[in-house]
Amino acid sequence: MSELISKKYGDFDYIIVGAGTSGCLLANRLSADPKNKVLLLEAGGKDDYFWIRVPVGYLFTMNNPRTDWCFSTEASTGLNGRSLNYPRGKVLGGCSSINGMIYMRGQARDYDHWRQLGNSGWGWDEALKYFKRSEGHVLGENEMHGGSGEWRVEGQRLSWEILDAFRDAAAETGIPNTNDFNTGNNEGCGYFEVNQKQGVRWSAADAFLHPIKSRANLTILTESHVNKLQFEGNKVIGVRFWRGNDLFEASVFGEVILASGAIGSPQIMQASGISSGALSQKIGIQNIIELPGVGENLQDHLQMRLVFKVKNTKTLNLRANSLFGKIGMGLEYFLFKRGPMTMAPSQLGGFAKSDQNKETPNLQYHIQPLSTEKLGDPLHPFEAFTASVCNLRPESRGHVHIKTEDSREPPKIQPDYLSDPADRKVAADAIKLTRKIVSSPAMKKFEPEEFKPGIEFASDDDLAREAGNIGTTIFHPVGTCKMGPSSDNMAVVDERLKVRGVRGLRVVDASVMPTITSGNTNSPTLMIAEKASEMILEDAPS
């Protein structure tokens, strides 16, 4: 392909590949010093689509080629031969522009475990200061929260009778009420806090990129798809990228930083010859650096979506299926920035243990006052709610592998959900716990009737199989360029996120997580980027 390279784009101190959650923050922090010349490359487009800003617009951004790469997984045995849609953000802000907006850090044990694996500097006490640094909590700063950062955190702007009842039912089964999931131990049930500002989605682009996009030392290019990294020996000296049908090259004096997520970052590395020799040989690529862990260790949260019909209350189903209901919701939003159009996909959350032998919660609930067959389908024509529950710490591991050397082609994504017997047991236990909550006295007046999976499935084997039928991703892929010590042959980056065996290259996104966090992964990714920006500047030549 070298004969196609005819255009030199320029020289930079830092090249950031991907303007998603981490890329937006990195661009902000690295360009704060006017001496640093920064290039930010985004393969997707601008974030100027109307439905990005409206919180309920996630229904119109996922599986929409304007805003989503519209990936699909490979068929999975654990899902009884099903494949899943696998949304990934295709605009400035990346997945933070299309996700569920839930502000969630995970649990202290997640980060302490990273440190125990040999990644010094990544324990909870160290991570907390980086969470606080970027956080702008609506209630201001305190011991656990930041008040002056750019990442806006607010409470939700509506509640539902059926969700309040589920919270009360959870308390009756031993899951306490909580109003803050972000203090280190998530156990409890309550309404999620969200990344919104006065009823409008607040993406990483809104927080970190748009306010500083006019900096003279920052160049932002959309629709610019990185083709390959450029090498001189084992040192990365730049990137090649497509803009339309033209191929450009940009050189770097400092570092190239991959911030393309758990799918995009290993894809670029593999296409550049950084992977296992076997994969490179299979694709017909020269293997430059042998790193067998690139693209392996894929972890994700699989949610089981239990649906219950209810009576004697209102849910979104019938309101959203009514013309007058839609008009009313629209007026409420545009006049007051309130009502169902401010909804995150899930309003009520819960963290619980699948069995009491667990040291900390290993299940997360996302409770929604609505129901569909699957995301993007019309709402059911009856009143119902969805109790989605996921295993926070799955044992199953999958992979991301390129199919061709062209990084514009979607890779093979195989999460291998429910492949580990331990995950199948947790799935069965999670369904049984959900049924226990819904049968509690607080729910009685609503006469809940299980619609999915159905009460006819009762044995552990039946429930594990049905988990494969009703399970779907909650879009939390991590781990495919995992951080680890030199003793770990499958580690891709070290504790400073430098790619092993390569000079001038770091990975800064969810792919570096050695194990998945216990909750939604967007804000942990932001924390990683905040810490990484500090390390990058510390390591810069004086």
Image (cartoon, grey):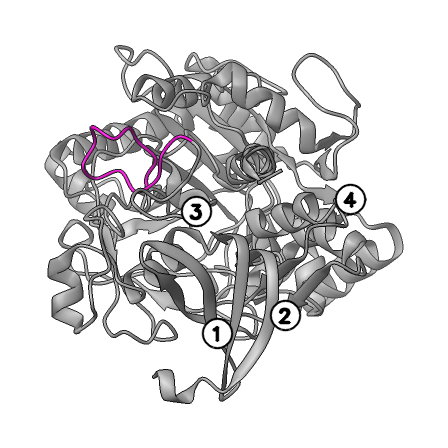
- Earlier in the chain: of badge 4 and badge 2, it is 4
Residues tagged 1 and 2 counted as in contact (Cβ below 8 A):
yes
Judging by the rendered image, the residue that carries numbered circle 3 is 507
- Earlier in the chain: of badge 1 and badge 2, it is 2
Q: Amino acid at mark 3?
A: Val
Judging by the rendered image, the residue that carries numbered circle 2 is 221
- Determine the residue located farthest toward the front in the rendered image: 542
Residue 308 appears in view: no
Q: Residue 280 appears at what percent x and percent y?
A: 18, 64
Q: Amino acid at mark 4?
A: Lys
Which residue sits at x=26%, y=38%? 491
Q: Amino acid at mark 1?
A: Phe
Judging by the rendered image, the residue that carries numbered circle 4 is 197
What whole-number distance in Å separates the C-alpha atoms at marks 1 and 2?
A: 11 Å
- Determine the residue located farthest toward the right in the rendered image: 335
Residue 289 appears in view: yes
